[in-house]
Amino acid sequence: MTSPSTERIASDGSGVRAIGAEMRNLWTALAAIAAFLVGSVATWYALRVSVWPVLKSDLVSATGITVVATTPWDVILLQAQVAAGVGVLLAVETVLYRSRSALLSERWWPGEPLSAGVRVLLVAVGIALLPVGTALGYDHVVPVVVDLVASDGTTWPIVRWGRIATGVATVSGVAAQIVFVGAVVALGGRTR
């Protein structure tokens, strides 16, 4: 469902203006707010229940790293910042999806629209790639970064280690989504 103003702007070819017009649509704004809230609350809950204890145990078991305890407020603030960041990312992705007709114009995609089943599948795979890429980044990229940073034997607070781990893992998740979007757009351009 796109607004008529988005359809008009899509013919002009300006993707940024199309996104701006779609953001003024009430349903798009509500969908973005819902994505932000659900993403933030789910991420914060996952961090509190399972991710933070795993991070603490992984850092303690790593060789040459001394984990310094900080105040609980710092830990909660970091978890809230990560949750808000994931919520903003999901809200932006929601707006981009809602303005897809303007973004995937005739230059990138064939004239016939995708069926609803294909769109649902692509959205589900795109959403699933964020946590999968984040988990893979945490398992494979974060240990390399920790080894590089901890090579000098300095003592850092666990919140700083948490920022490094969540930053690297989140970038890995977003990179997985970007590769998927690039592949989908490339396939769409090839089928013209």
Image (cartoon, helix red, strand yellow):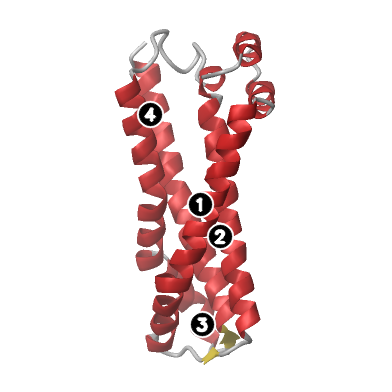
What residue is pinned by disc 4? 184
Please, is residue 150 above or below residue 182 in the view?
A: below
Which amino acid does the dot numbered 3 rest on? Ala
- Mark closer to the observer (2, 4): 2
Q: Earlier in the sequence, mark 3 or mark 1?
A: 1
Which is more foreground, mark 3 or mark 1? 1
Q: Does 192 appear above or below 67? A: above
Q: Mark 2: which secondary structure?
A: helix
Q: Considering the image in quadrants, where does the C terminus appear?
A: top left
Q: Residues within 10 Å of mark 3 (few under 14, many from 20)?
A: some
Are the residues tagged 2 and 3 within 8 Å (C-beta)?
no
The answer for how far apart the CA atoms under marks 3 and 1 are is 32 Å
- Which residue is nearer to you in this view: 88 or 142? 88
Question: Is residue 81 left or right of 55 when viewed as pictured?
Answer: right
Query: Residue shown at 36%/46% (left/top)?
Result: 128
What is the C-alpha distance between the residues marked 2 and 1?
7 Å
The residue singled out by tag 3 in the image is: 150
Q: Secondary structure at mark 4?
A: helix
How many angstroms separate mark 2 from mark 4 (CA)? Answer: 28 Å
Closest to the observer, 22 or 164: 22
Near mark 2 (Cα within 10 A), the count class, few <14, some 14-19 or many ≥20, is: many
Q: Earlier in the sequence, mark 2 or mark 1?
A: 1
- CA distance separating discs 4 and 3: 39 Å
Q: Position of residue 57 (x, y in %)?
A: 39, 84
Quickly name the residue at label 2: 83
Pointers 2 and 1 in contact (C-beta within 8 Å): yes
Q: Secondary structure at mark 3?
A: helix
The disc, 4 or 3, on the residue closer to the chain's N-terminal end is 3
Which amino acid does the dot numbered 1 rest on? Gly
